[in-house]
Image (cartoon, rainbow, N blue to C red):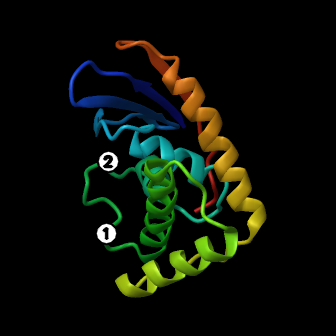
Amino acid sequence: MKLTFTKGSGKFDRLDIVASDGPRAPIDCPKQGIIPHDMVHFAVEAEVTTTGFLGLVAAGGDGGYRLGLEDRAAQSVERLVEMFQGEGWSGAATADDDFIALYATTCEERGDTPLPLTGEPIASIRARIADLSRRWAAVPVGGQMTLELPDHPQ
């Protein structure tokens, strides 16, 4: 699946997705001071095998904000994305054991089952986010960054 992020001049960036069976409707990505939320999804979903928002889009989902709300596994991925997004906003990484514990608590509070995590995938996701952050910062307004997410077996 090809993901093309376009840096907007206003309150939104845009994500265009081309899945194996064709393009999807564009997605507006509200600016949040760090990389776009769906780019954080890319970083997480490239490292975990559980289907999240982008995997659901690839499988034919419409890309709307409600996509995946009924999918408990996708919600577990969403909680993980939110954890890394929070680190991005704070500008500092949380110790792995604390990160895992907070992730578990966040999932449990929302009725989701946390994905099994260790320090290795956490480090890989953080490294990917750091790389994406550097690259996205260099993209001018109106410029694009294209990423490819391999298909995971459903």
Quadrant assignment, res 133:
top right
Q: Position of residue 45 (x, y in %)?
A: 58, 53
Q: Quadrant of the N terminus?
A: top right
Give the residue drawn at x 35%, y 12%.
Answer: 142
Q: Is residue 139 above or below residue 116?
A: above
* Residue that badge 1 annotates: 69
Q: Is residue 130 above or below residue 103?
A: above
Give the residue drawn at x 42%, y 44%.
Answer: 38
- Identity of the amino acid at label 2? Gly
Give the residue drawn at x 58%, y 81%.
Answer: 101
Q: Secondary structure at mark 1?
A: loop
* Residue that badge 2 annotates: 63
Q: Position of residue 41 (x, y in %)?
A: 49, 50
- Identity of the amino acid at label 1? Leu
Q: Position of residue 68 (x, y in %)?
A: 35, 64
Give the residue drawn at x 65%, y 50%.
Answer: 126
Q: Are marks 2 and 1 in contact (CB under 8 Å)?
A: no
Q: Quadrant of the C terminus?
A: bottom right
Q: Earlier in the sequence, mark 2 or mark 1?
A: 2
Q: In front here: 75 or 118?
A: 118
Q: Is residue 115 above or below residue 81?
A: below
